[in-house]
Amino acid sequence: MLLLHRAVVLGLRQACRLKCTHSRLCIQAAQDSPHIYTKEEVKSHSSPETRIWVTLGSEVFDVTEFVDLHPGGPSKLMLAAGGPLEPFWALYAVHNQSHVREILAQYKIGELSPEDQAPSTLKSSDPFADDPIRHPALKVNSQRPFNAEPPPELLTENYITPNPLFFTRNHLPVPNLDPDTYRLHIIGPPGGQSLSLSLSDLHQFPKHEITATLQCAGNRRSEMNQVKEVRGLEWSTGAISTARWAGARLCDVLAKAGHQLRDTEAHVCFEGLDSDPTGTAYGASIPLARAMDPEAEVLLAYEMNGQPLPRDHGFPVRVVVPGVVGARHVKWLGKVSVEPEESYSHWQRRDYKGFSPSVDWDSVDFDSAPSIQELPVQSAITEPKDGEIVESGEVTIKGYAWSGGGRAVIRVDVSLDGGLTWQVAELDGEKQCPQKAWAWRLWRLQATVPPGKKELNIVCKAVDDSYNVQPDTVAPIWNLRGVLSNAWHRVHVHVAP
Ligand code: MTE
């Protein structure tokens, strides 16, 4: 998430344009006769005051002028200050590309002394080496960390997405946790009791089951990218899936620890057991009011479709917050605490927020926008695919529709002529409880291809039970991170002669 290909390229290009007298002098010096530095010397350059140096292989770089331009944020680059880049590049493999190295070369100031040139740790310290094996049908958006979506034609084959095809959104390597020694720490209120729960302790709470759709805020980001470049993984329509989840209700576990809904501003903060090289864990939070509401059905889930959670989806325990953006469904859950404010995690405060199309990376103020919780109404066409040739006569159009906050989808409209005329699709799927429509509706339309038509501009749009509708185009909802992409979905097909 943090260090993405496009972002890296953009940031580095921008950095390239920067005129840094110091760097140029250093580069010149390095070209004339490479200056030799010891590891200790490099280590002493780890702050803006002393300048910020890093190494890659045998080379030493002064990246002081680049830190503020680092696409993943200055703090992430500062983690490597005074030391080697390899452990970080191994984690964010997008850096391992020739153009990134070429641009970094401009910051070169010398060489590491031969005694300090340890063999590259890139392969031996591969933090992803223990990641699980994945289904080959998944369309991979990034291998390390692993991010992948099911192809559209498989996505709506089943109302319940089979576990191996469920989309995966990881920011870090997948931890390999031992279910026998696993403990979930629930921090109690002041004067109350903290809990350290084993898996079998968690099974002692009443088992609660729900069918819920999980959607990443970046679903359909690739369409935003076509309007104007955004930073983020190129998700198509598949960063969404549905499962039957089972586990303990969060409200039951919080109550056991003595928590009550006293402070309506408070948040329940979740920490994962996946972490970056500094030990910083993935984290996110939801309002305490949602967590304590039994009707909100927030789960500490240990089962997905009748199976223990697969490793990619949070084994042994994850949070499931129905109706809420995927980012809050923290996987590999290690710690739960109630705090007066929302989580200080990067993914809560510096990501997964929406902005006006006018906001760019120079003007963005992350504190000015609330973190995304409930998602807006969404739908997409999964069949036919863009560019496909369909038979004349009849065409079957299929897709999914879902809305956040438990709002039920009440209708899906489909057009074959780009939105001039509409037909109502048939909705499949389970009957949904009012205010608790956690799962998607699959839909289909069997339509007559107008005689003589050589091509069709198929469009879909959904309406939820608050009569929220999807916007017709992407441009007015474009935002720099490419989140909340829910414009009418459009597919252009040719009709066989
Ligand atoms: N939890 C942890 N610990 N680490 C993560 O990287 N990714 C989040 C969320 N929970 C993440 C996490 C995001 S952004 C999404 S969309 C969902 O998990 C994806 O869940 P899935 O991989 O089971 O589909």
Image (tube, grey):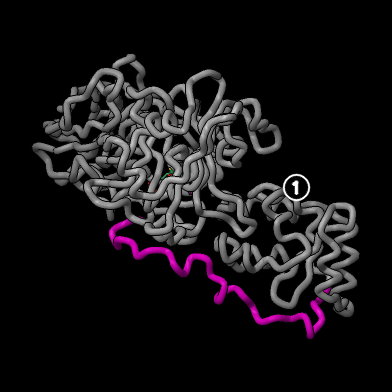
- Res. 76 in view: yes
Quarter of the C terminus within the rendering: top left
Q: Residues within 10 Å of mark 1 (few under 14, many from 20)?
A: some
Picture coordinates of residue 246 (x, y %)? 28, 40
Q: Residue at x 47, y 69 (%)?
A: 129
Indicate yes or no whether the magenta region holds residue 28: no
SS majority, magenta: loop
Q: Taking 309 as reference, is 170 left or right?
A: right
| Secondary structure under the numbered disc 1 in the rendered image | helix
Q: Which residue is mark 1?
A: 68
Q: For residue 91, what is the image quadrant?
A: bottom right
28 is higher (above) or lower (below) than 409: below
Say what amino acid the circle numbered 1 marks: Asp
Please indicate whether residue 31 sits to the left or right of residue 409 in the image.
right
Say whether residue 193 is left or right of residue 323.
right
Span of residues in magenta: 110-139
- Image coords of residue 403 (percent x, y): 34, 27
